[in-house]
Image: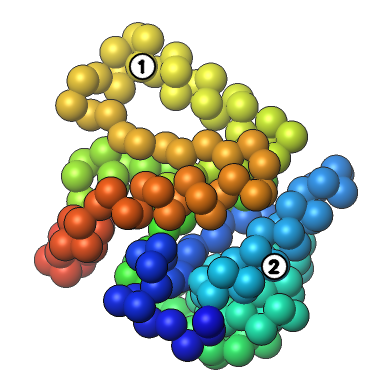
Amino acid sequence: MQGMNRTENISKIAKICVYCGSGGGTDPAFIEAATAFGTAMAQAGIGLVYGGGDVGMMGAVADAVRSNGGSVTGIIPEFLLNRERAGINGDGLIVTADMHERKRKMFEMADAFVAMPGGVGTLEELVEQLTWAQLGRHKKPILIANIKGFWQPLCALLDHMKALDFIRAGMDFELLVADHVEDILPKLQKAAAAVPEAAKDMPPAVADRL
């Protein structure tokens, strides 16, 4: 299964970009979820694109993918190499000049995005993808893994923005929510199957401006 390419993968998802914390949080359920999701990805023949770190949630999901024979690509800016202990990745570690280049490469290599529990960096990466989707720049599925209700405050804030008409008609976006790890891949696969391939990718000229 690991050798599948994008056209052969019936789910239309060959690689998932996972945003998550360089820490593990105070609840063991978060690391357990990262490990379970990494295992599920590898067993489904889906590769991982992630921030390249070898600690916290990032390390847990990458270790699980690797341990189960899956493909792992880490992308990390040079200034974080020591701070986040860059992992040894089966498909190599891509070192970028800055955060902007890192996020662009993560976008280009992934067919879908999953945000697991994390900190400000995880939130920033998630919100940037939501913004690009809201502006109609791509239609790749975006999902939050709402482990033990971690993302509930964000969901409430988005509902608040909609209620006050700051997210208006025509500016909405689809944010998938999975409360359990076993629901993540089915939700992503269903969403990906409904989107034409041509609508998923951001035009190069637009990506350059972002």
Where residue 161 appears, x then y in whole percent?
A: 39, 18
Mark 2 vs mark 1: give the one in front. 2
Looking at the image, which residue is at 31% across and 35% down? 173
Q: Return the residue nearer the eye: 12 or 117.
A: 12
Mark earlier in primary sequence (2, 1): 2
Where residue 144 appears, x then y in whole percent?
A: 54, 43
Up-down relation of residue 27 to residue 167 (above or below) = below
Looking at the image, which residue is at 66% across and 59% down? 37
The answer, for residue 205, to whether it is visible in the render is: yes
Looking at the rendering, which quadrant does residue 109 occupy? bottom left
Residue carrying label 2: 39
Looking at the image, which residue is at 62% across and 73% down? 42
Where residue 32 appears, x then y in whole percent?
A: 80, 55
Up-down relation of residue 145 to residue 168 (above or below) = below
Query: Left of 32 or right of it: where is 193?
Result: left
The quadrant the C terminus occupies is bottom left
Task: Identify the amino acid type marked 2.
Answer: Thr
Task: Identify the amino acid type marked 1.
Answer: Lys
Q: Return the residue nearer the eye: 117 or 69.
A: 69
Up-down relation of residue 140 to residue 174 (above or below) = below
Query: Left of 74 or right of it: where is 203?
Result: left
Mark 1 crowd level (few <14, some 14–19, many ≥20, 10 Å Cα): some
Looking at the image, which residue is at 35% across and 36% down? 174
Looking at the rendering, which quadrant does residue 11 occupy? bottom left
Secondary structure under tag 1 reads helix
Mark number displayed over residue 78: none
Up-down relation of residue 60 to residue 169 (above or below) = below
Residue carrying label 1: 162
Q: For marks 2 and 1, give the CA distance.
A: 36 Å
Where residue 135 appears, x then y in whole percent?
A: 21, 41
